[in-house]
Amino acid sequence: MGAGHFPFMSNIRVLVAKLGLDGHDRGAKVIARALRDAGMEVVYTGLRQTPEMIVDAALQEDVQVIGLSILSGAHMAIVPRVLRLLHDKGMDDVAVVVGGIIPDEDAAELQKQGCAGVFQPGATLEEITGFVRSVARAR
Amino acid sequence: MLHRTLSGVPLENHYGPDDVREAEPPPGEFPFTRGIHRTMYRGKLWTMRQFSGFATPEETNRRYRYLLDQGQTGLSVAFDLPTLMGFDASHPNSYGEVGKCGVSICSLADMETLFDGIPLGEVSVSMTINSPAAIIWAMYLAVAEKQGAAWNSLNGTLQNDILKEYIAQKEFIYPPRPSMRLVTDTIEFAARHVPRYNPVSISGYHIREAGSTAAQELAFTLRDGVEYVEWAIERGLAIDEFAPRLSFFFNSHSDFFEEIAKFRAARRIWARLMRDRYGARDERSTRLRFHAQTAGCSLTWQQPNNNVVRTATQALAAVLGGCQSLHTNSLDEAYALPSEQAVTLALRTQQIIAHETGAPLVADPLGGSYFLESLTDRLEAQALDYIGRIDGMGGMIAAIERGFPQSEIAQASYRYQQEVERGERLIVGVNAFTQDLGQPIEILQIDRAAEEAQVAKLRALRVRRGSGAVESALGQLRRAADNGVNTMPALLGCVRAYATLGEMCDVLRESFGVWVEQAVL
């Protein structure tokens, strides 16, 4: 129990973060557990993370992948800020994967801006864990 | 196929006389398993109350007038995330979030616009607001005052259920104990000054949406209710002074019979708790009144038209379970806030159930079914077991502090998701009968104009209002918060001086502190 680390054999490290004011954490928690059960090391930030907090945590925890969960509709305002901060800090090698209620045109735009992947409702845990593994290995 | 309810209760092939106890008393009689009124919907149909709010108060006011014109019989306000979290639209944390999930309210001026032309003395209004509930309610009372509506004529409901925020919905500002004090302030103020208003709507809806089982929803909600009762008694109120105005809010999910059983079990458990544990004498204190909303988490992104069918069966379960008011979700809500066309269809779904199916003509029409009575007993037993465990921990706040309900819900939601992944539970259009249709519907888009408009209005307000009066009112709020007196009179003073939501919440943040949860996976 509690936030923190889940050390396993894998060397894939993932930060799962709730971005913005949105408190809906059911999806983020299910994904964090699924990644952990798939053998990755998962750090879950908890709620209400600003882009600055997320990028700092990614640096501290030395993760290859950041998974952002956002269901509030504010993704087009806040996700690009995370991408910009990562770029400013020379952390372009960290892959950003977004999950939530993201309409098709927004998903395309976020990928254009540098998100490695965008998962909409209905994506399976298997697809998501497989994707995270593949982008982490590519880093 | 799993031979279990959606919540995991194992099911027999069929049920018979050996599965039920003695017959329940008729509807309208203690413990009200069969309904809180003898005549049920023959006496009064449920209130059709669609939860609604987006962008600016001006735009939401237009939607409310439209819904009332379409035959909706009550209003229900959805606020945006900055409002729910006690930030003005101009706060840096509000960036990108203003008006997205509901309407943005920053001061009394916004509230006046929201209810412009809507007589609060006649229309009952429910408001989904929790941490800043006392502040928003003060704004509402001030608008009623300006419209000339007497407080003792007001009907409506404040959600104001902070405990389920720590458990599930997670829109909290202050730590649990000072938050409970604010809730108790509103219960006390309502009992003394706004006697027909429901100051708390004890909510299982969000607990279920966060992934709980039906039994967990039932248990945690009723145990939250017990916590509010104990705090109000501790404040010096007599049980029958406030318990008649406690109301409830449940989810109506997809497992048809389990949901009907849940509503029936809720009434039976609450009636007995109020009479036997708290000595309620007034029968109204023992009647559990509830609003129901169909399950948002059951709506699918794929094949969204299927959501109309899901919502219809969930709504029918709520009606057969004896709800007092109902919200039906719109087919497009897995994508966005609903379009006007979608919300009209959702309202029509209720109207068809009310006027074409015959379902409202007989009270508790499924009462006496071997299966339903057995399932009602089963859910009651599971809920009482949880309630006993939480009592043993020292109450709900202690349970929340040790992460107990949060962890039970996280386990249940992970288990459910795995069942779906393994194909043990089929969801039409998701893991069965799939079609690749792309994004097939038009959705409501809320642009950044709402944020800009709200920020501009705030700037003008700060110039227009008398800053001396604001400072003095905020000072009185600070003293009330620090000295432990009821905050409602000081909040009314702040609101009337046009202090902003963020300013009032900041005073309380300084006095009470803020809550950061230990995340439970």
Image (cartoon, coloured by chain):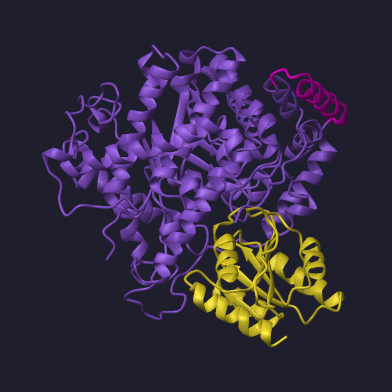
Q: Where is residue B38, by image quadrant?
A: top left
Q: Residue at x 72, y 65 (%)?
A: A78
Res B341 → quadrant: bottom left
* Residue located 54% across and 19% down the image: B194
Most frequent secondary structure within the magenta stretch: helix
Task: Examine the rendered structure and indicate whether residue A67 appears above or below residue B236.
Answer: below
Give B260 or B143, whichever is nearer the viewer.
B260
Q: Residue at x 49, y 34 (%)?
A: B202
Chain B is shown in which shade? purple
Q: Nearer the viewer, residue B263 or B403?
A: B403
Q: Is residue B148 left or right of residue B14?
A: right
Q: Which residues are magenta?
A: B466-486
* B212 on left or right of B134: left
Where residue B80 appears, x then y in whole percent?
A: 62, 49
Image position, residue B33 (x, y; %):
28, 30
Q: Is residue B224 visible?
A: no
**Chain assigned yellow:** A
* Location of residue B148 with respect to A26 vertically, above or below: above
Image coordinates of residue B407 in percent, x first then y, are: 55, 50
Measuring 44% from the left and 66% from the top, which residue is drawn there? B418
Can I make out residue A126 in this image? yes
Quadrant where the C terminus of chain B is found in the figure: bottom right
Q: x and y percent of residue B242 in the render?
A: 50, 18
